[in-house]
Image: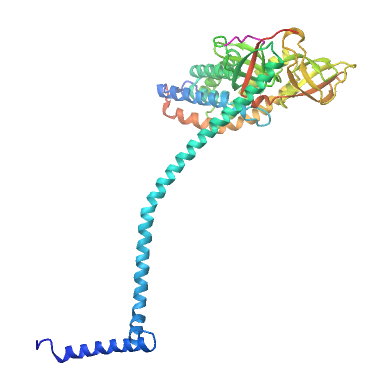
Amino acid sequence: MNFQKSRRVRGGTVMTVIFHTLFLMIVYLLQAHVLPFVNALTTIPLVLPLAAVAVAMNEGGARGAVFGLVSGALCDLSFHKPIAGFMLLLCAVCMIIGVLSDTVVARGFLSYLFLCVATLMLCGLAQMFALLVFEGAPFYALVMAGVRQGLVSLPFCIILYPVARVMDKRAVRDYSS
Amino acid sequence: MKAFVTKRNIAILVLALLIAAVAVVSRSTRGDPGFITNGANALTNPLKRAAASLAHTFETIYGYMYKYEQLMEENEALKEQISALRQEYREITEVTEENKRLHELLNLSARHQDFVLDAATIMDWSASSYSSSFVINKGANNSAAKTGDAVITETGVLIGRVTEVRAAESVCVSIIDTTFSAAVHIGERGAEGIASGDFELMRDGALRLANISDDTIVLAGDAVVTSGRGRKYPDGLVIGTVVSVRRDEAGIGMYAVIQPEAQIRDATYCYLVTEFTEQ
């Protein structure tokens, strides 16, 4: 496959950046102030990383990393933790996803779903690391908590992906070199 | 004159006189107005009824249009009254709740006169499923909050501990968080132990009383209160009640499950114990 030829370039309009930022802000408000009171399967859904993945798929590597950084910082804030762990994690993850979506990964819903599952697994591992290593929490319980979190979070993909795609439509251009 | 006195005019006059005579005679003799009058009434009754019905309809429409506006105005006035009453009811309810809290706080202050309390409001809860923490509206700039301060309800029930003090807010972990631990007395026998958060029990909103020794008797229903040992928390703060005693995963020792006394997730108002006298 000739990646050079089929490279997609983002339109880079200011409006798209503003839309995506607003999108992440709204999802953050949902994550921090609404979902903590939703107790499905005794677990709180984690939707901010899913929104970051959607934006990264549309925006590409560099911008995806920036949005991942912002989303990660917001995640840390919603977890009442210092802005470090999730910021770094989502920055790296979104950069990788952005590059992949620019090159080998099709920008469809199934790809998005697969990437969300992978992201949620990484987020779960990040959250359970300290509990596993420093507090000796049982591994099985931590893994089951991660699985439950994934199960209650994935349905939000159905809403987040179309919204992110609609915001991106006006900015994407295909060109051949 | 000749124009008036014609055969036709005379015939009409005579007819009229006859009809009148019949009516008079009939009235005098039988008491009714006579067959001619009755017949005329019978012919005109339908018309009369139709006219009356039409008049009634117009009256109804007019009344409807006129009264509709009156009803609309009355309706608006009543809605405003209801809105004002609802607002008043809400204010009264809030004041009543606050009164109740302050009464409880007064009781608490009477029981723990050494406490220096700072009222706070819980602003939000952590969005993580792996921890249980909340943020209160007291920080370095607006209170004497410091890391390690106990967070209690107005009835003296421990619900958390301050872990991070920011400028205008502080982060607290709740008693079911895995990072929480406190030295406690158990039941009336005064047995001692350590109550701590447990990841598996956190899902159920409970915490763990770990490492119960063989000579410690712990029964379901025993109250768990802070003992003040280690000078982390004041003594006498209620944590919860033992609901069950179980064997631990290794099968060697026992632990108890403590159900918190307070509905932690439902709490809105709390108090920081910024100072207390160690017993």
- Foreground of the two, B201 or B166: B166
Check the image and name the residue furthest to the right: B215
Residue A112 coordinates in the image, percent (x, y): 56, 28
Residue B265 coordinates in the image, percent (x, y): 65, 25
Q: Quadrant of residue B202?
A: top right
B147 part of magenta stretch: yes
Q: Residue at image x 63%, y 9%?
A: B146
Q: Quadrant of the N terminus of chain B?
A: bottom left
Eyeballing the image, is A75 above or below B145?
below
> Can residue A6 be seen here?
no
Count of marks overlaid on the render: 0
Q: Residue at image x 21%, y 88%?
A: B13
Q: Quadrant of the C terminus of chain B?
A: top right
> Is B272 positioned to the left or the right of B29 in the image?
right
**Where does the magenta region start and end?**
B143-148
A17 part of magenta stretch: no
Residue A108 coordinates in the image, percent (x, y): 53, 31
Q: Quadrant of residue A84?
A: top right
